[in-house]
Structures are given as C-alpha cells and as structure tokens.
Image (cartoon, coloured by chain):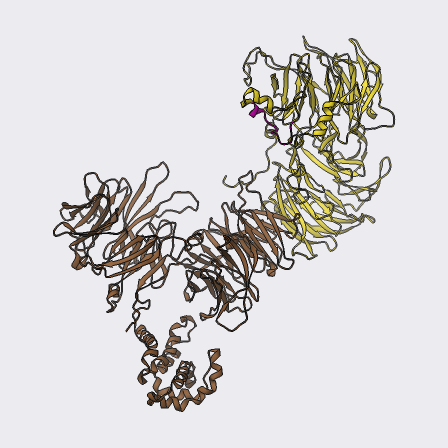
Chain colours: A yellow, B brown
Amino acid sequence: MGEFKVHRVRFFDYMPTAIRAMAFNSRTERLALARADGALEIFNFADNYFQEKVIPGQDGRAVEALCWVGQRLFSAGLNGEITEYDLENLRPRYTVEAYGGPIWTISSNSQGTLLAVGCEDGTVKMFEILEERIQFQRNLDRQKGRIISLSWHPSGTLIAAGMMDMIRIFDAETGRATHRLLVERGVGASKSKEVVVWSIVFLSDHTIVSGDSAGKVQIWDGVTGTLVRTQLVTKWDVLALSVSNDESSLVAGTSEGTVVQFQFISSTVGQQDKEWVRTRTFKNHSHDVRALAHTETAVVSGGMDTQLVVRPLLDKVEKNTQESALRKMTLPHRSLVCCAKKAGLLLFQFPDHLELWRLGESDGHGKPGDSLPVKRKPEKLIQLKRKGEDHICCSALSPCGGWLAYSTVTSFRLYRLQNNNISITKVSKLPKDLRSAHQLCFSPDSSKLFASSSHSSVIVVALNQPECKYLHTLKPKSGESEQPVHLLFASEDGKWLATANTDCEIHVYNLDKLKLHCTVPVYSSCPTAIAIHPTTSNLVAVHADQQIFEFSLVQKEYTEWSRKLQKQGLHSLWLERDTPITHVAFNPQNPAHIILHDTFMFCIIDQSLPLPEAKTPFYNQMTLRSLPEPQRIIHSHAFKICKNFQHLMCVSLLEDHSLVVVERPLLNIMSQLPAPVRQKKFAT
Amino acid sequence: MVEHGDIRVVHRGGSKINFREPVITHDSRYLLCASGECVKVFSTSTEECIHDLRGHTGLVTGVLLKPSNHLQVYSCSADGTVRLWDYTDGILIKVQLDSCIVFAPVFAVSVIAVIILVWKAGHNLFQLVAVDLPQSGDQLVEARELSAVLSDVSSNPAAIVFGRGGEYIASANGLHLEVYFFKKQKSYRFSLKEDNKKGGKNTVTCVACHPKDDCIATGHEDGKIRLWRNFNHKKEYTYSTLHWHHSAVSSLCFTPEGTNLLSGGMESVLVQWRYNQESERDFLPRLGSAITHITVSPDGALFCTSHSDNKITIIQSCVKVSAVIQGLVKGESVRTDMMVDPRSKSLVLNGKPGHLQFYSLPRDKLLYNLDIVQQEYIHESGLEQFEVVKAAFDASGSWLATVEERKQKDAELELNLKLWAFDEQTQSFVLNTTISAPHEARITAMCFCHATDSQTTMLVSTSKDGHFKAWQLVSDRALYRKAEFGPSWSCDFVGAYHGLVPECCCFSADGSLLAVSFQEVVTVWSPASWELLTTLSQPPKAVRDLCFGRLSCSKYLLGTTANNLLCCWNLLTCSLEWSTSMDISLLLADPLTENMAAFCCQAGSTDLFVFKPSEPRPVFSQKAVCSGKVTRAVFAPREEMLESCEESSQWLNHSQLYFLTPDLPVFPDIVIFLPPPFKLVIDDSVAMTPFYLLLGKHRQQEDADPLSGLSAERRPLPQCSVAIKELLQTPAHVLPSTSFLCSMFVQSLLISETKHVEEEMESEKEEEDSEGEMESSTQRPEQASLGGQAAPALTKAQLRELKRVKKLDHSWFPGLLHS
C-alpha cells in the first residue's frame, strides 16, 4: 500500500446548518432541501441520493417552505418573499414580495396552476403560476392570527389552513372559509399557551390530518368538520407531516427526534373500512424533525441535527439490499477544502468566510502508526470575510499558494497572496466575463485559472503579476447540456482540462489548442470525482453509483483496466458504501496507484494487482498484515482501504509525498448542536 | 371391615394453581383453575374453593369454557383425556380419550371441535391438533380423528392464541410469528431479528389477539409489546411498538370489547393500555409477585392475574384487588424443613422470599405468611436477597427460631438468628431476639430441646465454623430492670469437638441428652452440665442424619451415614445395636410413637420404610412411593386418634406422614411441568367424623353388598344417604337456610315411616337412562312394601328395581309437606 507521512488535520470547524424545509418531486425523484442559512440543496434520489446541486444561501433569506411545481422550485420565507430558483445557473431567478408579512408556508395545487402562501397577517394569498413568473391573483378571507400551514385538497377546490388554535377550510374558488375546526390546547401548564398547528395534510377522501404544538396528531373529517381521532404522539411538538402518494401511509416528525408512522389499514382482514392506525416509530434524530418527505419507498427526514436521514420502509423494499439500508447524510458531497500542493497550504471554505492555514511540520522519524512530534504548529494565516450578502459558493487556491479565488452567486474575487510576509491583495482588474463561477480551478503551474460559468462553459484566465487576462471560453458543442459544471480538473502537464456536469457529461479540452478534445461516453450516473493521470493521461472518473472508469485521452477509449473492471464487476462491499467518492488523486511515486476517498475511508487502488473476486474478503488490510510475506502476495488485491481516519473532508497528496487528511468527526458536529428537548430516559 | 386396607399415597394439596391461566365463568361468580390432577372451582367473591372436579389421572394442563354451553367446561390432562364437566355441580359429562396425546392444553373450542396442543413423542415436536367431538351419548368416547392444524409450535400455550371469532390462529415460536387463516388455509410467517444493537431481545413470550379487530399483540423478552396489523400480507404487514416493561412480558390479554390491552410481567404491575391510544395507560402496582397469566371475565368486569408465588388475584375493573386466592407458595427451593406448628397444626415452610408460610393442610389453604426478614423484596433477577434457611419450633409452639442468610458475591456471609415468641393476644409470633452473626459460617442444623417439663427452653445451633452453640432464654431481672424488657435469648454454651465441623444435632425426647454429629463422630452431651458424655463413631463416612428414638425406644440413637448405612446405637451400652446398608435420604421420627420413617432413594425412585428401632422387621414398607428423591417430610399428629386394627396401617393411627415430592419432570424425556408438591400417605383420606361413620359404613356395605346378599334392616341406610350426601356435597353457599334443611334432613333420616309415601308419588328422573323404566317402577309399590317385610322372597330382578327406586331423589318431598 505504501507508507505516507500523514498530516491529520482536525482544525476545519465545518458546521452544517439545520434543515428547515424539504420538498420531494416524485416525478423527477429530486429532493429539494432548505437549510437554516438559506442554502438550497438538490438530491437526486434516482442516482444514489447524490447531492447534485447546491444553491448557496444569502443573508436574510430564511426559507420556511419549499414547493415544486413541475420542474420549477419555489421557496418562501420569513422575509416575506417568494423566490423561484434557476436550477441551471444555481441562483435565485426572481423574488416576489407577497406583502403579507413573513410567509410561513407555501403550497401549490396539484394542477400546478396556483400557488398559495400563508402569511403572518392571517391572509392566504393566491398566486397564478405563469410561464416565466408568478402573479398575485387574490386573497382568501382574512383570518385573525397567522397562517402556519397550508394544504390543498387534491381536487384543487379546497384549502385547509393550520393556524393558532384552529384549522380553517377555505373554498379555493370563492375564497370563503367554510369550516372552522378548533384544536384543543395541551393539558397542564401549556393550557394557557396557544396551540400551533404546525403542519396539515388534506387527503383526497376529505380527511384532514393535523400536527400541532401540543404533541397531537389529529384526524378530522373535512366534510363535516368533526374530529375523528386524536393520537398523542409526543409531549412536545409535532412539527411536520407528510403523506405518501397513495395516501396509505403518513409520517409525523416530532421535537423529540422521532418520526411516527400512521397507516391507513383495515381493522379486520378482508374488509373495506379502513382507519388510520399508529404503527411504527423511527428514532434517527437527536433533535427536532423539522422537515419530512414520504417517498414511495422511504421516509426522508431532516431537522435541527443537520442530518438528512433516508429511512426505507421495509414493507416497500426488498429486504437486505442496498435499498433497504438506512442512510444518514451529514457532510456535503463536494469538496470544501483546497490544498496547495507545493506550498503546503490549506483553504477551508465556509459560507461566509475563507480560512487559509499553513500545515504543521515535524522532523521526527517513527515507526508506521506512531504519531510524530510537531515541530511547528499549524497556523491560521488568513481569515477572509466575504463581501456582500451572498454566501460563498466556490473557492480555489493555486498550487503555488500565490493566488486565491472565490465566487458568490453575484460576484467573483481574486486575491494575490504573499506567503513569506503574509499579505493579501485583491486583484482589481478582472475580465468582465468573469462575474460568477460554479467551480474554480487553477492550473498546476498556477498560470491559469479555470472558472465554470453558465451553460457548461469554462472561462480560462491567464494570471500574470500585475493583472489577469481573459484568454478563452471553452464550450462544449452547442445544443448540448445546459446544466452547470460541478467538477473541474486540469492535468499536471497543463495539456488537458476535464469538466463534468450534472447531466453526467464529461468533456475533455485540449488547453494547447483551446478546443474540445473529446467527450467521455455518457454514463447514467453523475460523476462525483474526476482526475487525469499525470503520466499516462488517463482520465479516472468515479460516479455516484460507485462505478470507476478509466478513459484514455490519447486513444479516446476506455483502458484495458477499466474494461476488465467493468467485466468483472466491483466488489459488493464497494458498491454498498453510501457516500460518494469526492476526490481522486495519483501517487507520483507509483503510477499504478490511484488514491480515492469518501467520508468513511480512503482507498488506494493498485492497478497492478488483481481485482478482488466476489468472494474474497474486501477489507483485508489487517489480516494481510498478520500474514507472512509470500501469502500476503496471494491474498492481496487491488483495493487497499484505510479506515483509520473518519469522516474525511479531504485527502490530498503534497509534493513532498506526505498525505494531508482533513477530518471532521461527526461527534464534534453533534456536540456543537444546541441541547435537544428534555426527555425522560428509563433508569436515569 | 375394610377389605382392601392398602395404604395409598394421596395428593393432599399445595398444587400449583398458577400453572395454566384460570377461567372465569360467564356470570363472573366462579373461577376455574387447573390444580394438579383436578380442576378447582373457586368463588370469585369469597375466595373459597367450592369444589374440585376430580377425575383426571394426570396433571391437568388446561381448562376452557364450552362456548355453546356456559355451564360446561372442558379440561384436558397429561393422561391423554379431554373431559367435559358441568362445573356448577361437578358432574363429569363426557370423557374424550385419545391415546396418542401425551401433553394437551386446550386452546379453543369451536362448536364441534377442540383444538389442543399435543406433544408428539415420536416426532419430538409440539403440534396443534383439532379433535372432533362425536355427538354420541356415551360417557367415554374415543376420538380417532386428529387433524393437525399447525406443527412446530411453541410449548408455551401463552404463545398460541385464536384471533377474531376463531378465524385465524396466531402462534409464536422464538422469533417467528405465524398466522394461520382457517378459511383460506393459508399461513403467514413473520420473523424478527434476533436482537438489535440497542440490546433488545426480540424473542416472543406471549401473544394475544384483539377480539374485534385484526390486531395481534406480542410480548417480548425485552419488555416490548408489538401490535401487528395487516398480517394477511406477506410484505405490507406492519407493527407498532409499546414499551413500558423492563423485563420480559409474561402475559397479555385484551378485554372482551377490545378497548384495553392488559400486560404483566416480572414487575408485578398490571398495565392497562388503551387500544388505539396507547400513550395513555393505567397501572395497578404492588401485586406482590411476578404476573404469570392474565385473564378477563367474559363481561369484562373482573380481571384475574396469576402470580409466580402460586396466587391468583381477582381485580375489579383494574382499580381494586377484590380477592386473593393463595395456594402453597413455592419459591425456587424449600430450604427450611417442613414443620408442623404445634399450635395451629399447620404446615410451616418457607414460601414467599423472606417469609415463613403457615399452611393449613386439611383446608389446603394458606393461613398466613410470617415476615421473617422484614426487608423490602426487590423484584429483580440476579439480586441476592435475604432468605430464610432454617426454622424450628419448640415443643409447645411458643417459640420459633429462624435463620436468614444472604451471600453476595465477594461479600461476607450475612447471618441472622431470630427468635420469635408466640403472642397470645395477637395469636401470632412476635420478634423477641435478633442475634446477628450467631456463627461465623453457615448454620447446618438447629433444634429446640423438646422436653415439655423443663423449666428453661434451649436452642442448639451447629455451624460450619466448627462450633455448636446453645442458646437460652435469660430472664435475669438484674440485667433487665425495667419492666418492658422481657426475657431474651443469649448464648449459653459454645461447644466444639477436635475442630471438626458439626453437621446435625438432636435432643433426646426427655431433653436430657444432646447428640451432635461431628463428621463421622457422634458426640453425646448432657445439656444440664455441658459435659461430653460419650462419643460414638462409625467410620469412615460422615453422619448425615441423627434421630433419638421415642417412648420405649428412647435408649436408641439412630443415624445415617454418607456411605449408605443406617446405624442404631444403644445409649445404655454405648455400642452399635444394629446397622443396615441402605441409601437413606431422609430419616425422621414420629414424635408420638416409637416409629421412624426412612426414605430411601433407589434407582430414581423413593422407597419408604417405617420401623421401630427395637424391632427387626419394618412395620411398613412401600416401594416406589414416588419418583425422585424425597428430601422433605413431616409427621403431623392427628387431632383424633384413629383406631385401625390393621397391623400395617397402625403406625398411621397417631400421626400422618406428609412429604414433598421432588421437583422432577413427570415425563422422563422432556421437562414440561412440575408435579404437584404434596402427597399424603394415609390409609383413608376421609376423616373420622360422625358423618364419616355414617357414610363410610355405608360405602363399605355397598362394596360388600354384591357379595353378602341383602338383609332387610340395612336397606334404609343407602336410601337416606342420598339426601345426606346431597346435603353434604352441595356447596354451603348454595344451600337454602338451615331451618329449611333441618326438617328435610330429619325427614330423610326417618326412612321406614315415609317409605310408603314415596311410592305414591311420581319419581323424578335425574338420570337419563331411568326414564325408560319409569312405568315399571310405578308398578312396584306393593311389592316393595312387601319386600320390606319379606325380603328373602324377592327375586334378583325385583331387587334391582328396588335399588333403583331407592336411589331416586325424594328430598324435595318433605319440603312439599311443609308447604
């Protein structure tokens, strides 16, 4: 496997923010997720839950609710605005002021023609969805008290609104309130407190299900306006409800971190009359479950503890398959760390600032496994606060450590760094084409900057001492994808630039000719990491479904090794991993080594060794170590996996052949969360 | 008179009443539960046992009400029969024989079939089979058609239950739940994971079905309750989990309307869950000991919980314990000897943890528990707590000595010797002296000096620490000047013998000698001077049991040794009188006669020898009294002496011998249940009372009748006995008032006078088969009256008719006369 001196970096205090809202589009199988800082993430559930797109947040934009209308995504927040997003350019398309105070909820009818928002001032405002924008249509009857939750009846004629202490049913056509359902307050001390109907669901059989701050899930008859059943689910709040498409199952998220499932089942076998029965309880969160989505096969939940949990329903999926495994997603599926290989610097990206660190040094020598004494401590050189309201969406550090660039949705900034006396100067004159970027990358000799821009194009900028100059815009053939480029890689020799976009296309450009060299055959799964080998010029691409491809740029075809790998298939344990590979690197000392990492492990693939058979033990590093030399050769296979470092944000090889490992233990993230609601534990 | 004077071994009581779940009748007045070889009928309001349904010859393994007739009940037994009873008057209606069944608790009864759990010895598995009940009038029916319903089921009947209206059956075995639908003949199987990461143990311990909805509740080893729904789908089944119990749920039960679910377990708390609103629950705590079964009366008014300490609690609407039916408490082991309280003549042994129980043998009822340890018992497994290990009464029953001990891991042994005085006012024992750490090691034996005339009471205890100590009641006024201090106990003498460990001790009947065995040496001491009088020894093995002879044999000292020798020393000559080789597990002396009983364990069963030390031949011997090794037995003095002239049963004239059957499986190859713990060796189970004389003589006559022919003056007796029998056997609470009965009783005794009257009236049938011969009986009057005078002239056929007439019930008639 080879031995490395490892810089174990634990000073990246990355902190994901709480999940506020979720919306699942069952047609495209995309989950939109809003975080407390206003950032939006799109997960592709059809492609191994890959975090496809991230729209950075903005100060003052707190998303309270999300809503898909076809392919269009709308959000509303407490700033009183409705925002539609441009998912191709990863930025808000426009915002509309609703003029009703803070908006608590947004919901569209099933026809996708109207958007209803519930406002603080007690109005339900209807917006007409037009081709390019939305237009205010009218107000429903104004109520006293804020509108917290809204749900359309699937026919589109009725709207149920959850308010303080009550639920109102409106006729969507006349705007009149037809029913007023009073929700009982909690008992005891909370009797004097208003009960908040946090979430409401209107089913096609006119049943209304509500979840409230008294911990009740109540089932109402929407025709007569009567209470059918009350289920006390928690001592605290029921914050979210979600129903499956066939309306046979309903989940409720509570402040205790539990998700309670209700099922619509007949009480006696073979009879038609069904009722809602509380069935399972899932406890996968330590904090409030703020957002829920009920997909066809799973319950997706997220909340204050920042994790996105996909809990498959075992009655809907095959047992003991990859699909039936519980998934927890905490760390982003893209790299927030940039490493200057030559200078030994690390750049950490936070939503509102950048941190530049110099790695520590050690001159000690020790046995493998020893921790060496630190001669010079790692040192934070620069903390760079962003300008403006928008959060940083991407950043890059040049390999020589002399240049630093970051971009927000609206602006792009480039800085010149002097390392010896630590100074930073902003490069003021920038080419005007370079206004914003989705992804940034410096060439290995730090002479060029590549910035992915709209329509899958890449802008090439030459960096010189006084100023920088626009060189070219690389574009794929016209008529191809409009999706943003999320991966950029410039080869070591400066000849090639590879780009990957969320339409799963990988383009390779020849930088000498500034022309498209070739396009790698499109694979169905999205690439999560790409790299070009420094000597053989083979492109290695790893996809969200964990497949690995090696593509020869010279011959413009898959290499022999890649074909062999595809023929034999990857080991099932490799395919069962649930986090994507986020980084690919090569070992210059041994050209046959490919270094990959995901959140839970890093792996060196030795292309010279045989591939593992389906039955061979996959994680065999420990057993190999105990074997004598000759047997070790027989048992060793190409995948060498190291799990010593956990919850990896970045693994990178420096020029002096030492390895930088940036860890962010999930336990540290958990410990920084606020205290959860108090719960009585048995025997405490 | 008695022709078959065989001494029989009779089950006397103390059987488990918590072995299977009891049944409450439809009117909620009676509670039926399987108890040993009979079914007991208790009144739910008075806690009294009304009568036993006797007839099974094996352990009764289940009781079930017949759904079509609320006054009838099925019972089944390990003897392979299913019996149908009329429980109100205890009449056996029908027996179903089934030869291949070994083990058969009843589960559910549809109109025509009983479904029972059987043990197929050949296949080594438990099976559920349906037995068709042929609709014939015969008493004894052989059921041949057995159709298997489910095979490979759990041996625990609580894990098998019938669903709504008997449409399906749910059976849990280990981690699997199987639901079988009768109509579709399809079964669904659901499995749970063995245990999850959080330490849950998912093994199913009990199952219950909702009476109206399709919902199955399963209780699990880790205390969870799962409610399964939608179980007619292979994949879309679903369950919700309730969790309150911290250890295994042992019983689950839905109320008849299905509004509540009751659960119970080790915690001794009855939990009531609202169906469909499971976050609301009610508790009934402090029920005394772990709940083993829960049943609900058909009207839902009464709950009934069986407990591990052989108790049934009847609870009214989950709030109030209204009645407690307590059987003999049998803890994990009986560590004290069986004793008879000289005052109450009740049996005393340890029962509830930390208690001594006083158990009335004639009534088969627990009188009371005496709290010895006086510490809160904590319901948690694996916790070492104080246990009563030794107890002894003095001769008059005014002093009781108890030893309690606790041995915790890595801790010193904690010992307490307590002496209790009988308080005449409260009629119970009051703690007089507590001696903590009376010895440094475990106490091996303890006995009181039995001399009735001696002024001072003395207690001797021997211990593993190599000493024996004599304790004496000190009433030194100088020491206790104040009046409130009564006399108390203190150590009088500490004896040892060459550092050997004393094993047992025994006082002679007059209290003048104390024998203490130190391994293979028996030392004889004089308690008055504490002088070592003599030593007797029988090497090479240690002495296990010591006993002085009584009355005329008081010069003998008997001992058993570990190498299977029974030795008899003559104390006058201080030499071995005789010895014999037998493996005696228990030797005990009858306090009222010279007799001694020895239980010998041989080849897996126990033989009993009763002998006098002075005579070479045993008075009585019986091979194979019971299987296993008898370790606890007692001679209980009779209240009235019996006058039996039979030589072999004379030894039972003064006292009765009770013994505790050992805990051994009934079936040699499988361990399923324990046998009832008590048997009585007695020549006749009926007590000697005036009624007995009346009835007993009659019975003997009946036996003698076919042989000896008829005699005219004896005729009236069997006739009147019908009325007497009825009077005696009807439960007291269903009898009419005494004034009403009195005249009836007297009338029935005056037979010869009323005889002519009875002939005029229509005889009422009480047996079905008598109907056919009604005419002939009405023709009979003249002949019968004639026969009264001229008996020898009657033919055999006439005699038979006469007998039949006399058997008819005429008791209603006197009542008619009065009105």
Q: Position of residue A304 (x, y in %)?
A: 65, 34
Left or right: residue A115 versus residue B255 is right
Left or right: residue B62 versus residue A201 is left
Instruction: Give the camera-side residue of B182 and B461.
Output: B182
Residue A100 appears in the rendering? no
Instruction: Give the camera-side residue of A538 and B456.
Output: A538
Q: Examine the residues drawn in magenta and state their main secondary structure.
A: loop
Instruction: Give the camera-side residue of B157 and A605.
Output: A605
Residue B709 appears in the rendering? yes
Quadrant location of residue A395?
Answer: top right
Tell me if residue A426 comes above or below residue B123 in the rendering. Answer: above
Q: In which quarter of the image is the C terminus of chain B?
A: bottom left
Q: Position of residue A50 (x, y in %)?
A: 72, 31
Question: Is A623 inside the magenta-drawn segment?
Answer: yes
Left or right: residue B491 versus residue A204 is left
Tell me if residue B773 comes above or below residue A70 in the rendering. Answer: below
In the image, which residues are magenta?
Answer: A612-624
Q: Where is residue A531 in the image (x, y as percent from the top left)?
A: 73, 20
Q: Where is residue B628 in the image (x, y as percent from the top left)?
A: 35, 53
Q: In which quarter of the image is the N terminus of chain B?
A: bottom left
Instruction: Give the camera-side residue of A194 and B573.
Output: B573
**How many numbered marks have been drawn onto this rendered protein structure?**
0
Question: Is A590 inside the magenta-drawn segment?
Answer: no
